Amino acid sequence: MKTMEMDSATAPLAEYARDVKKEPVILTVDGKPVAALVPIDNADLETVTLSTHPRFLALIERSRARHKAEGGVPGEEMRRRLGH
């Protein structure tokens, strides 16, 4: 993983994007990570967009909390309900 201070990242973005093929590039401010360039493998634009969309992430978190509190439907029961 390549880490650099944002103030030092003066090359064109395309150059850093090429480096991602070798290793992720993490940008920092005062040593704290603020951004990352990582390769996108096996993902489409929709997947990448949703993975950072605040409302979508909030929906996922609410669903996880509800599942934890109330439980879920076992796979066998879901297959029965769907007629499989």
Image: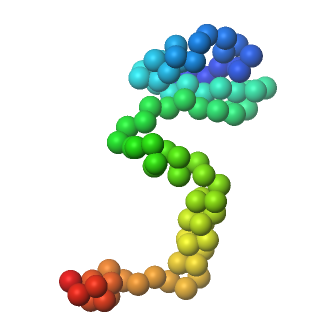
Task: Please state which of residues 56 and 67 is positioned toward the viewer in this rendering.
Answer: 56
Q: Residue furthest top?
A: 11
The quadrant in which residue 36 appears is top right
Image: 61 above or below 7: below
What count of labels does the image hold?
0
Task: Please state which of residues 32 and 63 is positioned toward the viewer in this rendering.
Answer: 63
Relative to 81, 64 lies left or right: right
Percent coordinates x, y for residue 77 in the rendering: 32, 88
Percent coordinates x, y for residue 67 in the rendering: 53, 78
Image: 23 above or below 52: above
Whether residue 56 can be seen here? yes
Which residue does the image show at 35% across and 42% down from the upper left? 42
The quadrant in which residue 39 appears is top left
Whether residue 76 can be seen here? no
Percent coordinates x, y for residue 55 in the rendering: 64, 59
The quadrant in which residue 4 appears is top right
Its colouring scheme is rainbow
Relative to 68, 55 lies left or right: right
Tell me the quadrant of the picture where the C terminus can be found.
Answer: bottom left
Which residue does the image show at 32% across and 80% down from the upper left? 75
Q: Residue furthest front?
A: 46
Which residue does the image show at 74% across and 16% down from the upper left? 7
Image: 42 above or below 62: above
Which residue does the image show at 56% across and 65% down from the upper left? 60
Task: Please state which of residues 70 and 63 is positioned toward the viewer in this rendering.
Answer: 63
Percent coordinates x, y for residue 3 in the rendering: 61, 23
Relative to 49, 78 lies left or right: left
Q: Residue furthest right?
A: 30
